[in-house]
Amino acid sequence: QVQLVESGGGLVQAGGSLRLSCVASEPIPSRAVMGWFRQAPGGQRELVARILSDGSTNIAPNAQGRFTISKDNTKNTVYLQMNSLKPEDTAVYYCHLDLWPSPGSWGQGTQVTVSS
């Protein structure tokens, strides 16, 4: 099973930017859908962005125009560029590899805290 490790989280002021990275332990399968999810305290895990096998992307409405997802196959890495951050973006961010119907993988998460 592919292991995922996220990094890049931290504390940032509102309006600032962060770039999250998700490194896979082996080449990302070409048919995989890679996604970033987040979970705020007391909340449910929600999809933030995903990149499909054809390179197209889906961004959640509350992140459109601010967040961008990209993938570098040469580095087995998926990125989430987050700009114009808001306090409500505060959450643990998780990387996910979807290989349905095969089992997927989750990373351990990285904390993002946006201060007002």
Image (tube, helix red, strand yellow):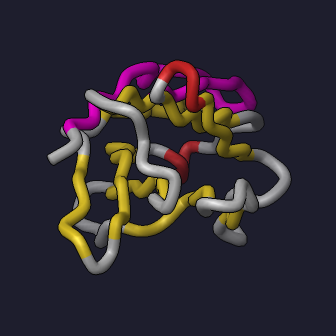
Residue furthest toward the bottom? 101
Q: Main secondary structure of the magenta part?
A: strand
Query: Is 7 one of the magenta-colored residues?
Result: yes
In front: 5, or 92? 5
What residue sits 23% from the left and 71% below the top? 102
Q: Determine whether 50 is above or below 25 in the image.
A: below
Q: Is residue 26 left or right of residue 64?
A: left
Q: Is residue 109 left or right of residue 89?
A: left
Tell me residue 111's x, y (percent).
33, 33
In front: 18, or 104? 104
Tell me residue 99's x, y (percent).
34, 66
What residue sits 48% from the left and 66% below the top? 47
Tell me residue 9's x, y (percent).
42, 24
In front: 87, or 46? 46
In front: 113, or 76? 76
Residues in magenta, as a range? 3-21
Determine which quarter of the picture holds residue 45: bottom left
In the rendered picture of this protein, how many numbered marks are placed on residues? 0
Q: Quadrant of the C terminus?
A: top right
Tell me residue 13's x, y (percent).
61, 23
Determine which quarter of the picture holds residue 23: top left
Answer whether residue 10 is visible to the viewer in this image: no
Query: Is 4 one of the magenta-colored residues?
Result: yes
Answer whether residue 89 is visible to the viewer in this image: yes
What residue sits 59% from the left and 37% below the top? 80
